[in-house]
Amino acid sequence: MTSNRLPVIFFGHGSPMNAIESNDYSKSWKEIGESLPKPKAVLCISAHWVSYGLEVTGMEKPRTIHDFLGFPEELSEFQYPAPGSIELANQVVEQLRPHSVHLDTRWGLDHGSWVVLHWLFPKADVPVVQLSVDHSLSFEEHYHLGRMLRDFRDENILVIGSGNLVHNLSMASWDVKAYDWALKFDEKVKYWIMEGQHDPIIHYERQGSEAVFSVSSKEHYIPLLYVLGASYPEEKIAFFNEDVMAGSISMRGVRIG
């Protein structure tokens, strides 16, 4: 393992309000940002950019996307003016061959990325590139794409995934701290990560009803597969924000390396 290899990190991003609220979640993200050396750029896989076919943002000034409704005006006016990196976007296109990756000039940064990045790099002075979640790929293919991205960690590129390990909005309730099935699956995934057992995480559908309830929003689970794919055996593993909120949303984060 190289001494200057950056970690790979999965963030449970939760509500967009975490961008403007100082709470336990955002405080931990701020602490992580302060613990990191400043990277050359960030490559983010966000749950909120789902496509048919792989796409990567390839613009110099990605727009801040407000992809939500019903939140305060303060949040709708929030801007995260981080630059893009056409250089990194082109590197991603080459790195993922023979997969075909389209260079996108329309998307930008959705709240899956800027809610977290605002706390990691508040000056918005680190270039950010997003890679889409291709709906047509299997979970195993997403994991292997993460494996293809891990060389970037040795090039001072911070690879992050942003979603939620357990994400079932249809069953969310502020009257429930955490459903038993959500807690159990969240803890099982933690155990598998610690043991280096990625197969049961990839093939969650084999793990019973707890997993099916927990992974009802697959696009929120997939970024974790990229992070696990981009990790190396025997790396240090740390968890943060080990909490299930509104009954069915896990805020668990994982830092590897």
Image (tube, grey):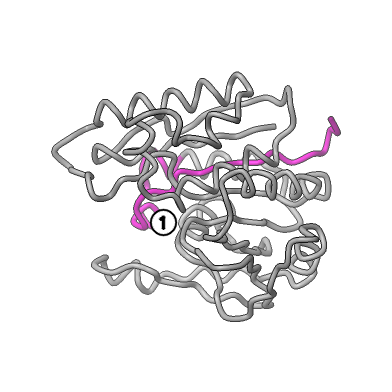
Q: Residue at x 61, y 67 (%)?
A: 53
Taking the magenta stretch, the answer to whether it contains residue 4 is yes
Quarter that holds the C terminus: top right
Locate residue 37: give its quadrant: top right
Q: Residue at x 50, y 37 (%)?
A: 253
Q: Is residue 257 left or right of residue 30?
A: right
Taking the magenta stretch, the answer to whether it contains residue 226 is no
* 116 w.r.t. 63: above or below: above
- Residue farthest to the left? 175
Q: Position of residue 103 (x, y in %)?
A: 69, 75
* 162 w.r.t. 181: above or below: below
**The disc labelled 1 sits on which kind of residue?**
Ala
Q: Position of residue 211 (x, y in %)?
A: 38, 33
Q: Residue at x 74, y 50 (%)?
A: 149
Identify the residue position indicated by label 1 in the image. 19
Front-most of residues 137 and 22: 137
Front-most of residues 169 and 256: 169
> What residue span does the magenta drawing correspond to?
1-27
